[in-house]
Structures are given as structure tokens and as C-alpha cells.
């Protein structure tokens, strides 16, 4: 009897959450018809969110995972419902949590030096407003970009409330389902675009989103496939892997392909001798399945696209003759000039550069630079850029240290996947802004959170 009462009490927050969310969605459509936008959903979700964060914060974290496909597939240029959801549930919830968990309950959230550096970096972001103001940034874009860039701080509630092995498994299962839905959404959009492609150069217009997220997810899933001994679990993981690898390949981003290969090679050195063959066989089998499915879906166009992928991949070694790569060097030169104008506090989040692109024969005005290291330095200045990437370096070497001492276990394999994911990010960030995108922000929160969770579980396993 007591157990049933407890289960009912535990379900109350979920039922209230779902009811209020349904009401909010209904009100959203009513408001659109009446011309009043977002007021009632924002109020109702905010009130409910505060209750959930105080009573059952774990479900708030799960709600972030569930809503992530809407946010990650959205167009960054326009404000839409995904931005409203992320502003309230993600960012609004983050600050409610920080207020309640740290200031009211007075809990500790710092584990090591990297956590201090991480918080210090975000505290210093207030200086960036002055950099943006004096450099003529569009302040509305600056505010949106800063708000989005707070998403990595979700790392702290993730590691605080995902405490047990079961919690970690649930987080990974929910993430796999959510990202699988995202992959299917992207495949649908890609399939529509592929139908209208007649020339090879048009392949550059297909979706090139979330490569970082899918790349790291692929590495983590590979690690979980190796660890699982049950054939049923292996098959489920392989099936979940296939849409990820198809989206990842069709992104046409060679630097990510290269990063994934290096990441897999890196992970081999931390595996027992028996498992090293397993990882290579697993990759070959899954890749072959992806190619077969691609042939089934593309039909007559399959040979054309396969040849295009092979040509693009083999061109990695000739990057110094690649026009698109040479244009990026031109872009870097302009960015370096901007860095020298304000080397200590940066030029602001929304600062734009201008240069003439020989590839498109057009003048580009953009706030993006296809190199995350240069982009962050241009936006924040040299000191804060060093602090930011010092956090990444610390977390990465921390995973290496733990992996050497950890027993072969589920937690070790998950941590190995995340550690390998750093390799992918470090490499891809050379030719893209991997850590300054929507999926990059969200991925950092998840990766840092999983490092905190697995580190704690591995230490308990070693000393217990």
C-alpha cells in the first residue's frame, strides 16, 4: 500500500507537467489565431518549471533531452517556438535551478579546477557587453547569442541529479531516442533536397547541421555496442546507429569524417586486446549496412552519390588545392585582423567580418568563422579564449587519467566514448565552429555532465 502511494506521489509532478504543457500548446495556437503571442504558454510553463525543478529536477533534465530535436533542427536566423521552449525550459530553468540549488539549498557544484575556470569564464562574459557595444554589434542578436551560449552550464544540474548507474542508462537511452528522432527529421529534409539535385556542386546545399552531436553520439554508441554482451542489446544499438551514420555521411563535412576515424583509432588504445577487433568489425558491419540502406533509398542515384562521397573523402589529402579550404584561409586572415583590434576583450558575440569570396564571387558579411579557436578569440579576446579551452583540455586529460585506472565496465565504455568525442571536437574545430553552434553548446553540457557522472561511478566502483 505504501509503495503504491509513493509511486502515485512520484507521478504527480509528471502528470502536472504533461497537463500544463498540453494546455500551453493549446493556448499557443489560440494566441496565434487571436494575434497575442506566447504570453500564456510562457507563464504556465514557467510556473510549472519552478515546481518541477524544486520537487523533481531529474524530470526537468529529461524534458530538456526530449525537446532537444526541436531546438537542434531549428534555423538559427529566425525566432520560433523552439527558441521559446529553450529560453524558458532550458535557460530559464537553468537560472531557477542555480538560484534554488546553490543559493537556497547551499549545495556545492564545484568538483575541480576546471569547474572554477568554467564559472569564472561565464562571470567574465559580462565584459563582452562593452566589447559588443563599442564595436557596433546588433544588441538583440548579441543577447540571443549570449543566452544560447549559457546552455553548456546545464552541465552542473546534469552531473548533480544523474547519480546512479540506472539514471545514467536512462539518460543515454532517452538521448539516443531523442537524437534518433532528430536524425530521422534531418533525413526527411535531406531526402526532399536530394530529389532536386542534378549536379555534384549542389550537394553543398544539403543539411550540414549537428555533425558534432551525431559524431560524438556515434562514438558513444560504438563503445556501448562493444560493451554489451546481450545480442538483443547489440542489435538495438546497431539499429539506432544507422540513421546517425547516414546523416553524418550526407553532411559532406570531410573534417568531421576524418575526426571520427581518428577518434575510433584513439579509443582502440584503451580497450582490452579482445575488444580491439570487435570495434573494427562493428564499424565495418554498420558502415556496410548504412551503404546498403542508402542504395535502397536512393535507387538509380545511388552510384552517383556514392562516387561523390568517395571523391570528397579521398580529396582530404589534397586540401591545399581545395578552393573552399583556400577561401577559409582568407577568412582567417580577416578574423586575425579583427582580433588584433581588440585582443584583450574581443569584439563581441555578434561582431561581423566582411571579405570577398572567390568561391562564390560575392562579398560575405558574417559573424561566423570556420575555425572555432579563431572565432572564440575574436569574440571574447585572447585571455578568455585561453581560459575556455583550458577547461576542455583539463576535462580531456581527466578522462585519460580515469580510463587508465578504471575497470572494464559500462561506465568506462561511456567515458571512453566521450573522451574520443573530444578528439572529434578538437579536430573538427579547426575547420568549423564546432563548439559555437546549437548542437555544440548542448553537446558540451552533455559531455561535461557525463564525465562528472561516470567519474563518480568509476571511483565508487574502484574503491567500493
Image (cartoon, rainbow, N blue to C red):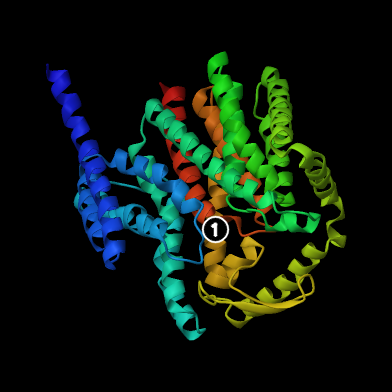
Mark 1, residues whose alpha carbon is within 10 Å: few (<14), some, or many (≥20)?
A: many
Q: Is residue 228 left or right of residue 170?
A: right
Residue nearest the viewer, comparing 429 with 461: 429
The front one of 260 and 155 is 260
Specify the quadrant that holds the C terminus.
Answer: top left
Q: Quadrant of the N terminus?
A: top left
How many circles with numbers are drawn on the protein? 1
Horizontal side of residue 264 vs 244, given as left or right: right
Residue at figure coordinates x 49%, y 52% from the top left: 72
Q: Is residue 106 visible?
A: no
Residue 338: give x, y in percent of width and height: 63, 79
Left or right, residue 324 beside residue 447: right
Q: Which residue is located at x 65 percent, y 38 percent?
A: 245
Q: Note whether 191 is above or below 272 in the view shown.
A: below
Residue at x 54% of width, y 75% of height = 346
Circle 1 SS class: loop
Residue 180 in the image: x percent, y percent? Answer: 52, 37
Q: Is residue 362 visible?
A: yes
Q: Quadrant of residue 355?
A: bottom right
**Location of residue 10 in the rendering, given as x and y in whole percent from the top left corner:** 20, 31
* Residue 8 percent across, percent down from the top left: 17, 27
| Residue 39 drawn above or below residue 127 | above
Q: Nearer the viewer, residue 401 or 265?
A: 265
Q: Which residue is mark 1?
A: 437
| Residue 178 left/right relative to 47 | right
Above or below, comparing residue 75 to residue 115 in the picture: below
- Residue 339 figure quarter: bottom right
Amino acid at each position: 500500500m505504501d509503495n503504491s502511494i509513493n509511486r502515485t506521489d512520484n507521478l504527480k509532478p509528471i502528470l502536472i507537467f504533461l497537463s500544463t504543457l498540453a494546455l500551453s500548446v493549446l493556448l499557443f495556437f489560440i494566441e496565434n489565431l487571436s494575434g497575442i503571442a506566447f504570453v500564456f504558454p510562457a507563464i504556465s510553463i514557467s510556473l510549472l518549471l519552478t515546481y518541477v525543478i524544486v520537487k523533481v529536477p531529474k524530470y526537468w533534465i529529461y524534458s530538456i533531452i526530449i525537446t532537444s530535436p526541436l531546438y537542434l533542427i531549428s534555423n538559427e536566423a529566425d525566432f520560433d517556438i523552439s527558441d521559446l521552449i529553450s529560453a524558458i525550459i532550458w535557460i530559464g530553468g537553468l537560472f531557477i535551478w542555480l538560484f534554488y540549488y546553490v543559493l537556497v539549498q547551499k549545495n556545492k557544484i564545484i568538483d575541480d579546477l576546471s569547474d572554477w575556470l568554467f564559472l569564472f569564464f561565464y562571470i567574465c562574459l559580462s565584459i563582452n557587453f562593452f566589447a559588443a557595444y563599442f564595436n557596433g554589434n546588433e544588441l538583440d542578436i548579441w543577447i540571443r547569442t549570449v543566452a544560447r551560449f549559457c546552455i553548456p552550464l546545464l552541465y552542473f544540474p546534469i552531473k548533480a541529479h544523474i547519480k546512479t548507474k540506472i539514471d545514467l542508462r536512462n539518460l543515454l537511452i532517452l538521448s539516443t531516442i531523442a537524437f534518433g528522432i532528430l536524425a530521422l527529421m534531418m533525413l526527411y529534409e535531406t531526402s526532399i533536397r536530394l530529389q532536386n539535385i542534378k549536379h555534384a556542386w549542389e550537394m553543398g546545399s544539403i543539411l550540414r547541421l549537428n555533425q558534432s552531436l551525431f559524431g560524438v553520439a556515434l562514438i558513444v554508441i560504438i563503445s556501448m555496442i562493444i560493451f554489451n554482451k546481450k545480442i538483443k542489446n547489440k542489435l538495438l544499438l546497431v539499429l539506432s546507429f544507422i540513421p546517425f551514420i547516414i546523416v553524418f555521411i550526407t553532411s559532406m563535412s570531410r573534417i568531421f569524417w576524418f575526426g571520427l576515424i581518428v577518434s575510433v583509432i584513439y579509443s582502440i588504445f584503451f580497450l582490452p586486446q579482445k575488444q580491439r577487433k570487435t570495434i573494427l568489425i562493428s564499424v565495418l558491419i554498420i558502415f556496410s549496412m548504412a551503404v546498403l540502406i542508402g542504395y535502397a533509398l536512393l535507387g538509380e542515384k545511388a552510384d552517383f552519390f556514392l562516387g561523390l562521397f568517395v571523391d570528397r573523402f579521398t580529396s582530404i589529402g589534397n586540401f591545399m588545392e581545395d578552393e573552399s579550404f583556400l577561401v577559409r584561409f582568407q577568412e582567417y586572415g580577416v578574423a586575425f585582423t579583427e582580433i588584433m583590434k581588440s585582443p584583450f576583450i574581443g569584439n563581441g558575440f555578434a561582431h561581423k567580418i566582411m571579405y570577398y569570396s572567390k568561391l562564390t564571387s560575392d562579398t560575405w558579411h558574417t559573424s561566423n568563422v570556420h575555425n572555432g579557436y579563431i572565432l572564440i578569440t575574436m569574440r571574447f579576446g585572447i585571455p578568455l579564449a585561453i581560459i575556455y579551452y583550458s577547461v576542455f583540455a583539463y576535462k580531456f586529460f581527466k578522462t585519460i587519467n580515469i580510463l587508465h585506472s578504471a575497470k572494464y565496465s559500462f561506465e568506462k565504455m561511456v567515458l571512453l566514448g566521450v573522451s574520443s568525442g573530444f578528439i572529434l571536437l578538437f579536430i573538427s574545430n579547426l575547420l568549423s565552429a564546432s563548439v559555437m553552434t546549437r548542437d555544440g553548446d548542448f553537446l558540451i553540457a552533455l559531455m561535461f555532465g557525463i564525465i562528472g557522472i561516470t567519474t563518480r561511478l568509476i571511483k565508487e566502483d574502484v574503491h567500493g
